[in-house]
Amino acid sequence: PSLAAHFIQRGVPLIPLEAGARAFVAEVESADDAVEILVVAGQIATHPRTAAEITVNSRTHDYLADHAPAGTPVLPLAMALEWFAAASGGTRLCDVRVLSRIDLPDLAAGHRFTIEGQLDLRLHSSAGVHYRARLAEPGNAPATALNAPQGAAVDNVYDSPALFHGPRFQTLQRLDALSDSGADARIVGVRRMDWPEGPWWTDPAAIDGALQAAVLWARHATGDATLPMGLDELRIHRTSPAPGPLRCLVQAGPVHDGQTTCDIVLLDEDGQPRVELLGVNLISRPDLAP
């Protein structure tokens, strides 16, 4: 307390204990130097200003070469969610939007990105702002109850032209049910896919697989191949990668003006929610005809 008073008297705000502890553990457990996260104290102790720099190249993120919808690697929404959550130490993000997609044409040379903000977060490069999100207070509400849809199972899901994912993004193991009302799928995460050990705040491989299941549902319901371009809310109930396979439930939402929405929950093997993605917004891909 005396040291805290010493800094406060000099106008130096302090990093909250919980956020500082998380940052310390993430740094100590880091297996590589791929991402450096700087936690900066702000004017409001409960919401320190977030600042992070991320370098993406073939050494640190070679698996992104398998996420190339039109032949050029593109940063997946799941990775942006991981960066926002990890940089802020948050478990609830709202109003996540893709403002302009991030192409990664030269992974060998590398790309650099920055996340900045306090409550309103921005992911940008030298070309401008690409993603935005709003950090929200963690909620105590129980997970949204989604009904398991009825429908036929689907074999060989990656034969669908709606999916473009290479081997290191083929996290969707099987689709047990698919209908207009939603989907029921089995998904694996970063550990099963042999992605780098992190540190990971979420499980971006599993989240990407959940979004793939949503894309397959949208294809079934509308006939269109789509891409996820944002979501109303991300709720992280359990941080870190999933220890085993997950069940993914997709529940249909409204369809209007070429846009499709749905809710998604990822459940651990014990049946408890790991992540919820609510109000996922999918738009038709311009490079593919219905």
Image (tube, grey):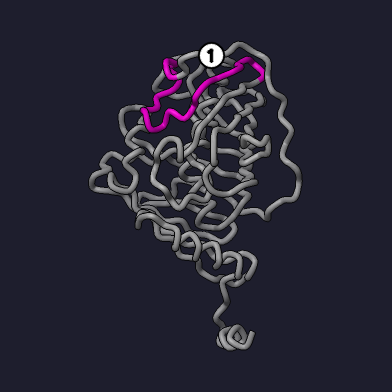
Q: What element carries label 1?
A: strand
Residue 144 rendering spot, x and y as whole percentages: 72, 36
Does residue 187 appear left or right of residue 265 in this picture? Answer: left
Does residue 43 appear left or right of residue 31 in this picture? Answer: right
Residue 149 figure quarter: top right
Above or below — where is 111 with respect to 50?
A: above
The boundaries of the magenta stretch are: 158-181
Above or below — where is 176 with respect to 27?
A: above
Residue 214 rendering spot, x and y as whole percentages: 56, 26
Number of labels in the image equals 1
Work out whether residue 144 or residue 122 is closer to the camera in this orientation and state it: 144
User: Label 1 crowding class (10 Å Cα cut-off): few <14, some 14-19, many 20+?
Assistant: few
Residue at the spot 74% in from the left edge and 33% down from the top edge: 145
Work out whether residue 204 or residue 229 is closer to the camera in this orientation and state it: 204
- Look at the image and tell me in which quarter the N terminus lies: bottom right
Residue 241 rendering spot, x and y as whole percentages: 52, 44
Q: Residue furthest right?
A: 141
Residue 12 rendering spot, x and y as whole percentages: 55, 81
Residue hosting label 1: 154
Residue 267 figure quarter: top right
Residue 178 is covered by the magenta coloring: yes
Residue 107 is covered by the magenta coloring: no
Q: What residue type is labelled 1?
A: Val
Above or below — where is 224 with respect to 59?
A: above
Q: Residue furthest top?
A: 152
Residue at the spot 59% in from the left edge and 18% down from the top edge: 176
Residue at the spot 72% in from the left edge and 51% down from the top edge: 139
